[in-house]
Image (cartoon, rainbow, N blue to C red):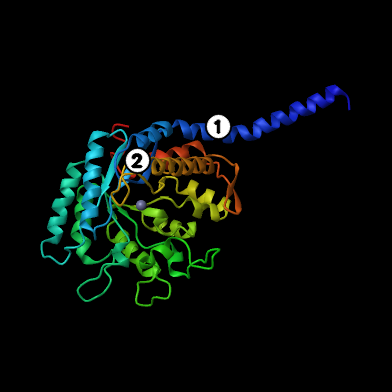
Amino acid sequence: MNTHLKKSIIILFIGLFIFCSSNSKEQLNYLNSIKKIDMHFHVISDAPYLREIMDELNMKFFTICTRGTNIDIMNFQINTAKEICKKYPRYYAWATTFDLTRRNDPDWADNVKRHLKDSFDYGALAVKVWKEIGMEIKNLDGKYIHLDDPIFEPIFNYIEQEGKTLIAHMGEPIQAWMPLPIGPDGKPTGYWANNPQWHFWDKPDKPSYNDIMAARDHVLADHPNLRFIGCHLGSLEFDVDEIAKRLDKYPNFAVGIDGRTRYFMWQARGKVREFIIKYQDRIMYGTDRSGGLITREGKETTPRDIESSIKSIMDRHEQFFQYYATDDEMPLGNYTVKGLALPEEVLNKIFYGNAVRWVPGVNNDF
Ligand SMILES: [Zn+2]
C-alpha cells in the first residue's frame, strides 16, 4: 500500500472516530454546562464542601425531611432545612414532613395543618410522606394505616389548596417481598439484612407490595389536582411499563429517579430510552445521597467521613451524567451497560425543567 493511501485511511478512521464520539461528548458537555437540581438529597447540616460540589456541578440540592414517627429526628431535620434554606437559597430548597405519633388525638389534623403552614412560611415547597405509612403505623384496631386512609384527607386537601407538592416514598422495591440475597460469606446481605423491619418476605401478617401500590394509586385518583411525585420511580423501579401505566392514568403523577438509576440500567436499553423520551415531562433527577458536618447519629464528621461523602456524591453524579448523556459502554459491577444518549432537551427537562414545573419555586435564587 502506498504511503499516501495509508495516510488517507488513517485520516478517514480518525475522522470516523471523532464523528461517532463527538455527539455523545457534546451532550455530556451540554449536561455539565446547564443548571441541574438533585431533587432527592438529605442535608444533615450545611457544609462548605457541599456548596463547593454544587458550584462545581452547577447544581442545587432539594433536601427532604422524613420520620413523622420520630419527632426528635423530624424536628432536627426541619430546623436544619429552615436554617440552611434561609441562609443559602442559591444552594438549598426543601420539603417538610409532619408528625404521625399523635394521629389519634382529635385535633391532630388541625395541628398538622398549622405545622405545615409554618413550614410553608419558612419556604417549604413540598411535603414528604414516607414508607412508615403502609409498612409500620397501625390504627387502634391494629390494622396497618395506608396512604388512602381517611385521616390524611384534610392534610392532602390542605397541601393541594396551598399549591404545594406531595412527595411520597411508599413501600419498598419489590425485592423486599422476596428472599434476602446471600453474600459471599453465606449470610444474608444488603439493606434489608441490616433493616429487617422493612423486609416483608414470608410475613403473611404484613401488607403486600400490591396493597401499598394500590393505596397510593387511590390517592392519585382521588386528588387529580394534587401535584404528586412518586419517589424512587414510584417504587415501581423494576419495570418501566408499570410506571408508564400510572403516568398514563394519572396526569397529576410524576416520578423522581432518586437513586434508582441502576434499575434503568438493568432493563432493556432501548425500552428505557423510549420510556424516558415519551414521559420526558414527568421524570426528574435525584440521587438520595446525604451529607453534612455531622452524621445522621449527630456525631461530628471526621475528615475521612467528608472525603468519602464527597467521593460518594461526585462518583454517582459523574456516572449518572455519563449514563444519561452519552452512549458510552460503562462498567456496572459484573455487567457492562451502555449510556442512553438522551437528546439535549430531554436532559434539560430531567435535570432541571421538570423540577421547576412539579415543585414551583425550587429554582429560586439559582
Ligand atoms: Zn431519601
Q: Residues within 10 Å of mark 2 (few under 14, many from 20)?
A: many
Task: Give the CA distance from mark 1 to mark 2.
Answer: 25 Å
Q: Position of residue 131 (x, y in %)?
A: 32, 61
Left or right for 17, reference 46:
right
Give the residue type that dot 1 points to: Glu
The label shown at residue 26 is 1
The relative height of residue 62 versus residue 222 in the rendered view (above or below) is above
Q: Earlier in the sequence, mark 1 or mark 2?
A: 1
**Residue located 38% across and 63% down the image:** 195
Q: Quadrant of residue 21?
A: top right
Quick one: quadrant of the C terminus? Answer: top left
Give the residue type that dot 2 points to: Phe
Q: Position of residue 292 (x, y in %)?
A: 33, 42
Q: Residue 301 or 345: which is nearer the viewer?
A: 301
Q: Residue 7 or 43: which is nearer the viewer?
A: 43
**Residue located 34% across and 57% down the image:** 169
The label shown at residue 61 is 2
